[in-house]
Image: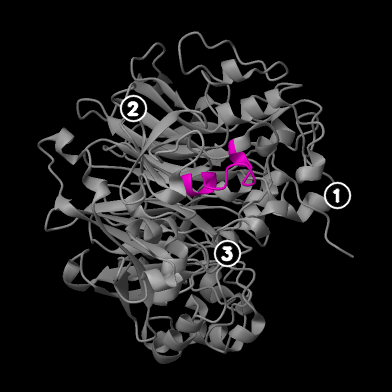
Amino acid sequence: MDEPERPRALAFESTEDRGSSPEGAPTIGDIMAARLDRRALCQGLGRGLAAAVVLGEPLASTTRADTSAADGAASAFRFAELAGGARETHHVAPGYDADVLIRWGDMVLDGAPQFDSAHQTAEAQSRQFGYNNDFIGYLPIDGRSDHGLLVVNHEYTNEELMFPGLGRQDGRAGFAATTAEHVAIEMAAHGGTVIEVRREAGKWRVIDGSRYARRITAETAMRLSGPAAGHRRMCTSADPAGLTVQGMINNCAGATTPWGTWLTCEENFNGYFWGKDARARHPDADDLARYGIPGEWFAWGRFHDRFDIAKEPNEPSRFGWVVEIDPFDPNSVPVKRTALGRFKHEGAGNVVNRDGRFVVYQGDDERFEHVYRFISDDKVDLADRGANRDLLDHGTLSVARFLPDGRGEWLALVHGRGPLTAANGFADQGDVVIRARQAADLLGATRMDRPEDVEVSPVTGKVYVMLTRNERRKAEETDAANPRGPNPFGHIIEIVPDDGDHAAAGFRWEILVRCGDPAIGAVGATFNPSTSARGWFSSPDNCVFDALGRLWVATDGNVQGAVDGLFALDTDGNARGRSRHFFSAPIGAEVCGPCFTPDLETLFLAVQHPGQTEAESLWQGISTYDNPTTRWPDFVAGRPPRPAVVAITRMNGGRIGA
């Protein structure tokens, strides 16, 4: 019997586990197996832990011990840990407040009407806070930690939770009840938001009428720049020059730059396109298949020709990019920086290298996809903000290969180098960046377990890759040293650039932690033994380093009864690999976009898709607008759950987690 079709919201979640990477190339599982076989026992795992990993024995008290005073002294974090468990509302560690700052439908632009979930319009939504907030960036005004701009991504929409009476809309055949106005509201709820915020008397508020306030949607005019601008694959009937595009979609994670701009990253863009019947006749049918296009998860192609590949065959090439936006100029035109490559971007963790060049690390968030790096040709000019305007248009995009001996190398995606030639379908650098996945395949890049955020420690310069999970890895791909096939738990890899140079061709790598419940030996989790029974996590997704160089990890799809939330993870010293639970999301939600103010006294979090039906309960019914699993954060009868941004502060003041 076939499995019932999932609602589109969950299709978005599951597509990252589906994968389109060709089989045959070595996966990160193969590399981990060889790597751990040689070195695991001498990397501080400990005799008992090594036995559990190899033999599947229970870890019992060695990994589930309560935190002792000595353990606490070794940790970089100081807070009382939160107990786990999914609930109707959010929870934060004792001694902290978690206040809702802004919610879906709240006013952003002057003239926005009061939110009325039962009578929505696209005009109202285009002036209100969008749906499913993901990445958050804080940009100080005049260097202040109590006054600045927040930039927020809006990734996708849950129609069954947004619209009264609509319910689940599954696949193209299930869109009969979806109207043009529903689609217009969805398009207006995508994109991003800029708001001005200020902390007064210890509490944060949004500044109404701010000159910086802005909504960016799936209809906002944008410019294409870099190698793919004007490329033949970018030309459409509406834009025969291939230089402009309407909107950005499925903006997941992102980053801010040292010159004060916002990098917002398009992820699962394939789901918006129609035309499965036409794909076989498409001139680039193989390319479409490699990116999973068309997905037909939304009804947009029914009402907008540009989202139907039979009518606009090149439109999909105009999505899947990193978009740079200047939040300090609400009249600026967003720019899709094509030199950074086209794939399902999670984030854009970055650092100014010691030679002054700008380095961006990126994950392609799908099963068996790759980790990328971009290095600008020119140096960052911190004294002249405008001098960096086109910095991201010129540079070298590379992809990572992880070697069994703990070494790694960056493989340049440059036209004419190696197999990236016209004979293999790459006529120019535009082809290389538009077809970045295929280019990476040809170079033999390592196929990873869903790479999401990739961030750089501001203290050590080490790079951390969040690998969420890979439930499709086959059991026969595993061995005694790597008993994680399938891998529903994820892991985190630490990269050390050679000689501390982020432009170096090589690096060293280690596994920081393998995730999951360490009490179950077969899971093979490798958290520090002092991690408590409530401190472990799985499915690492977004992450952030605070100014002290401490790593905070947000989860998406925590399993084995654990709730999604935010966890503090030590990366150095005797506490290395120790995790503590700091914040838990309401039922059905994930935590996204952790972001600190420079003084570390505020932590902003995005709570996305509260009330979304969880996979394990899907077949018993679905959470809807009319009958949700939670009404967070308002808890008003008849009002649906609302994605929101939360501001966390200490009750008595001071730094978060210190």
> Which circle marks residue 620 in the picture?
1
Taking 158 as reference, is 386 left or right?
A: left
* Front-most of residues 176 and 539: 176
- Mark 1 and mark 3 lie on one chain; the one further toward the N terminus is 3
Q: Nearer the viewer, mark 1 or mark 3?
A: 3
Reading the image, the residue beneath label 2 is 149
Dot 1 or dot 2: first in sequence order is 2
Q: Is residue 512 visible?
A: no
The residue tagged with tag 3: helix, strand or loop? helix
Label 1: state its secondary structure: helix
Residue that appears at 59% across and 60% down: 285
Ranked by sequence position, the earlier of labels 2 and 3 is 2
Residue type highlighted by circle 1 = Gln
Q: Which mark is residue 367?
A: none
Q: How many C-alpha atoms fall within 10 Å of the one at disc 3: few (<14), some, or many (≥20)?
A: some
Asked if labels 3 and 1 touch by Cβ distance under 8 angstroms, the answer is no
Amino acid of disc 2? Leu
In the rendered structure, does residue 389 fall within the stretch colored magenta? no
Q: CA distance from mark 2 to mark 3?
A: 42 Å
Say whether residue 197 is visible: yes
C-alpha span from label 1 to label 3: 38 Å
